[in-house]
Amino acid sequence: MHELSIAASIVESVTESAAAYPGARVKEVRLRVGALASVVEDSLKFCWELATEGSPLAGAALVINILPVILHCDACGVDTEIAGVQSFRCPKCGELAADLRQGRELEIESIELEEPDSVVPDPVEEQV
């Protein structure tokens, strides 16, 4: 299950990035994962819970955006989404195509931070 090492790497990267905002809490991490990245979404979410436990990211949500495979066909000059990875033929003209434009990504898309609560001083009562 390589999803655990992926989750651990994401936790490390996000923790380093969030360190630039002292006191802020990570609320959500958004990923872009291509359909060819060999990542099982449910396994990655499970491993995220394990990897964040006891860390500054504990309780942060992991949102995974699965990206379809987009293939560019030189023969007809179009970019199209292919339904499966069993055949890399252009759905428009049927020619073989190997120019993948999308589908192999594994990227942190964004990190949502929650600023620390501002400490509001208690009103000072005047004593008479």
Image: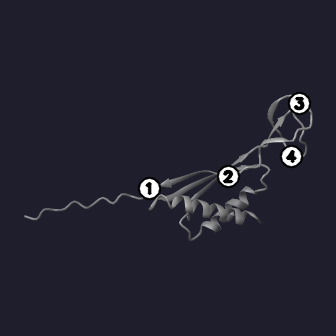
User: Mark 3 falls on what kind of element?
Assistant: loop
- Name which of mark 4 and mark 3 comes first in the sequence: 3
Tell me the kind of residue under disc 2: Glu
Residue at position x 86%, y 32% in the image: 74
- Name which of mark 4 and mark 1 comes first in the sequence: 4
> Label 2: which residue?
107
Check whether the beta carbons of the residues at disc 4 and disc 1 lie within 8 A of each other.
no
Circle 1 or circle 2, nearest the eye: 2
Question: What is the distance, in whole Å, between disc 3 and disc 2 at their CAs?
Answer: 30 Å
User: Mark 4 falls on what kind of element?
Assistant: loop
Quadrant where the C terminus is found in the figure: bottom left
Residue 71, horizontal then vertical, whole percent: 82, 39
Badge 4 density bin: few <14, some 14–19, many ≥20, Cα 10 Å: few
In this view of the protein, which residue sits in the foreground, 101 or 4?
Answer: 101
Question: What is the distance, in whole Å, between disc 2 and disc 4 at their CAs?
Answer: 21 Å
Residue 67, horizontal then vertical, whole percent: 73, 45
Question: What is the distance, in whole Å, between disc 4 and disc 1 at their CAs?
Answer: 43 Å
Check whether the beta carbons of the residues at disc 1 and disc 3 lie within 8 A of each other.
no
Quadrant where the N terminus is found in the figure: bottom right
- Name which of mark 1 and mark 2 comes first in the sequence: 2
Question: What is the distance, in whole Å, between disc 4 and disc 3 at their CAs?
Answer: 19 Å
Tell me the kind of residue under disc 1: Glu
